[in-house]
Amino acid sequence: MQLSLLPEGWFVSDEEKAIQLYNELQKELPKGHILYGKDVCVIAHREATDDILCQHKDDKARFTIIHLTWSGKEEKDTDYPYVECDGNFNDFLEYENRFLRER
């Protein structure tokens, strides 16, 4: 995976930004959510939509795009924070290509 291949609108998260976004994600995750209890790190973000790209630490080939709600608290519905895409890096790129075409 090369972060230089990030699609338009995505930015590599520096350590400070990654920690901030990770902390918000942890606040929002309810039990039963796909990422609840998963060891992930935030590697990139898209500021225009509050989306973050997480890489799974136990499966480095797996990536999940999450749309943060910025509620600052645990969500009640396990559909939130919303999972935009979950798969490998190519799945992420394909999802983003569709997203850009639809704009």
Image (tube, grey):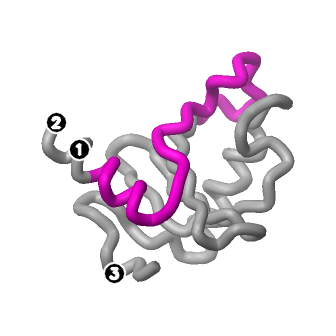
**SS label for mark 2:** helix
Per the rendering, the mark at residue 25 is none
CB of mark 3 within 8 Å of CB of mark 1? no
CB of mark 1 within 8 Å of CB of mark 2? yes
* CA distance for labels 1 and 2: 6 Å
Amino acid at the residue labelled 2: Glu
Q: Residue at x 75, y 36 (%)?
A: 29
| In front of the other: 88 or 4 | 88
Residue 77 shown left or right of residue 52 in the figure: right
Q: Nearer the viewer, mark 3 or mark 1?
A: 1
Where does the image place residue 34, in percent across and percent down from the top left?
Answer: 71, 39
The residue to which callout 3 is attached is 4
Few, some or many residues within 10 Å of mark 1 (<14, 14–19, 20+): few
Q: Residue at x 80, y 53 (%)?
A: 38
Q: Quadrant of the C terminus?
A: top left
Magenta stretch?
69-96
The residue to which callout 1 is attached is 98
Amino acid at the residue labelled 3: Ser
Residue 19 shown left or right of residue 54 in the figure: right
Q: Earlier in the sequence, mark 3 or mark 1?
A: 3
How many numbered tags mark residues here?
3
Few, some or many residues within 10 Å of mark 2 (<14, 14–19, 20+): few
